[in-house]
Amino acid sequence: MPVIKSAQKALRQNIKKKKENLIYKKKMRDLLKKMDSCLAENDKEKAKELIPLIYKNLDKMAKKGIIKKNTSARKKSRISKKLNLGDQKH
């Protein structure tokens, strides 16, 4: 445990931020799992409905600094590619 008062405050802030960041990351994982399950069931319409939610969450995470901007762009690209590849098979 930190001894200096400012270090104690910094620790409290880090713990609070970590909790907030984990909430965003968990939400992202859940959305991606939903999309993967929709694609596995060949329910492309439901997967397409999740795309705006996923993009919104990725943009918020990038804006808040939870993930980097390029990471957000890469994930969006891979998600759309996965969805479009599913369209080409049938």
Image: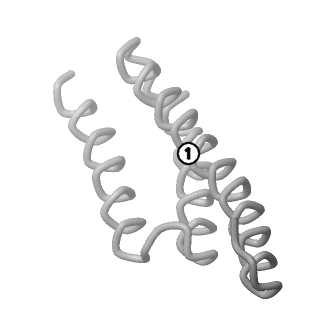
| Above or below: residue 5 compared with residue 68 | below
| Above or below: residue 87 compared with residue 52 | above
- The residue that disc 1 covers is 28
Residue at the location (61% across, 57% down)?
Answer: 57
Amino acid marked by disc 1: Met
Disc tally is 1
Q: Quadrant of the N terminus?
A: bottom right
Q: How does the figure colour the protein chain or chains?
A: one colour
Q: Quadrant of the C terminus?
A: top left
The x and y percentages for residue 8 are 78, 75
The x and y percentages for residue 48 are 50, 39
Q: Quadrant of residue 13?
A: bottom right
Residue at the location (28% across, 51% down)?
Answer: 78
Q: Nearer the viewer, residue 81 or 34?
A: 34
The x and y percentages for residue 50 are 57, 40
The x and y percentages for residue 67 are 47, 68
Q: Secondary structure at mark 1?
A: helix
Q: Nearer the viewer, residue 1 or 54?
A: 1
86 lies left or right of 55: left
